[in-house]
Amino acid sequence: MRKNRNEAQIIFELLESINSGNTQISSLLRKVNIPFNKYQDLIQQLKERDMIKTTQEENKNSLELTPKGKEFLEQYRKFSKLMVSSYGLNL
């Protein structure tokens, strides 16, 4: 059973999936395990925060991380490692 996640953890998982090339909505919803309305809200927030952008590929919209989104992933990973190594806390 999956533990409760905070918004930062959900955003990390969503950005991680997008970064690995997973950009189909249905696939992202299953991978991140969030309802569609939550997905829409997060995508809008991430666009407003300039962490993702939408690109057009062969008549399909595709999601792509911006440098700011990639930086978030890197910083979140570092913070997670610090929490585990220093305090034994898993994020």
Image (cartoon, helix red, strand yellow):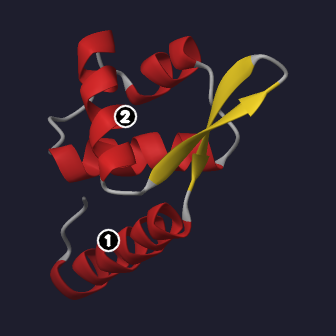
Residue depicted at x 72% and y 31%: 56
Helix, strand or loop at mark 2: helix
Q: Residue 38, percent across and down? A: 24, 22
Q: Is residue 39 left or right of residue 60?
A: left
Residue depicted at x 43% and y 56%: 51
Residue 1 at least partly seen: no
Q: Split into 4 quadrants, where in the image is the N terminus?
A: top left
Q: Is residue 44 above or below residue 70?
A: above
Q: Residue 90, percent across and down? A: 25, 62
Question: Residue 80, labelled with which disc?
Answer: 1
Q: Are marks 2 and 1 in contact (CB under 8 Å)?
A: no
As measured in the structure, the alpha-carbon distance from the residue carrying label 2 to the one carrying label 1 is: 23 Å
Q: Residue 26, percent across and down? A: 53, 11
Helix, strand or loop at mark 1: helix
Residue depicted at x 47% and y 73%: 71
10 Å crowding of disc 2: few (<14), some (14-19), many (20+): many
Q: In terms of depth relative to the viewer, which is nearer, 22 or 81?
A: 22
Location of residue 27 by image quarter: top right
Q: Split into 4 quadrants, where in the image is the C terminus?
A: bottom left
Q: Which residue is mark 2?
A: 43
Q: In terms of depth relative to the viewer, which is nearer, 85 or 10?
A: 10
Of the two numbered discs 2 and 1 in the rendering, the one whose residue sits closer to the viewer: 2
Q: Is residue 13 left or right of residue 21?
A: left
Q: Amino acid at mark 2?
A: Ile
Q: Amino acid at mark 1?
A: Ser
Counting residues from the start of the chain, the first of labels 2 and 1 encountered is: 2
